[in-house]
Amino acid sequence: METKTNKAISLLRAGNLKEALLIFRTFRIGFTKEERRTLQIASESLSGNSLFYQQLGIDPAKEIEKSRAILASKYL
């Protein structure tokens, strides 16, 4: 049986960040509050809501890169 963590890691290694973030953003353990927020913003930005975050003054591209760094430091 494949766990959510294993599935998310395999998606991340395959380069499918959008699908991996959909899983990782639901995790409550292992991430700080700020890291969870970054993963949420990155996931929603990749799903087509980047304009919303730009209007709030948040740089979606920067959040996506921060999410890559967070996930790489923890899982790769």
Image (tube, rainbow, N blue to C red):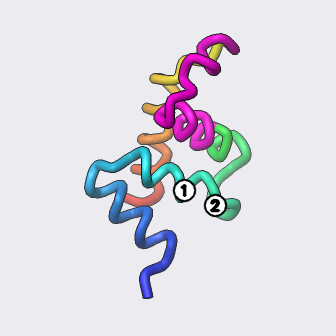
Q: Which residue is mark 2?
A: 27
Is 7 placed left or right of 37 in the picture?
left
Residue 11 visible in this rendered orientation of the protein: yes
Q: Tell me the CA gap for discs 2 and 1.
A: 5 Å
Amino acid type, label 2: Phe
In reply to whether residue 52 is colored magenta, the answer given is yes
Seen from the viewer's position, the closer of residues 30 and 51 is: 51
Picture quadrant of residue 35: top right
**Residue 43: percent from left, percent from top:** 53, 40
Residue at figure coordinates x 57%, y 27% from the top left: 49
**Residue 71: percent from left, percent from top:** 46, 50
Badge 2 marks a residue whose secondary structure is loop
Residue at figure coordinates x 67%, y 40% from the top left: 37
Quarter of the C terminus within the rendering: bottom left
Is 45 placed left or right of 33 in the picture?
left
Residue at figure coordinates x 69%, y 14% from the top left: 56
Question: Residue 55 bears which disc, if any?
Answer: none
Seen from the viewer's position, the closer of residues 10 and 75 is: 10
Is 71 placed left or right of 10 in the picture?
right
Seen from the viewer's position, the closer of residues 49 and 3 is: 49
Q: Residues within 10 Å of mark 1 (few under 14, many from 20)?
A: many
Whether 49 is drawn above or below 34: the answer is above
Q: Which residues are magenta?
A: 38-56
Amino acid type, label 1: Phe
- Residues at discs 2 and 1 in contact (Cβ within 8 Å): yes
Residue 66 visible in this rendered orientation of the protein: no
The residue at the far left in this view is 14
Question: Residue 24 bears which disc, if any?
Answer: 1
Picture quadrant of residue 11: bottom left
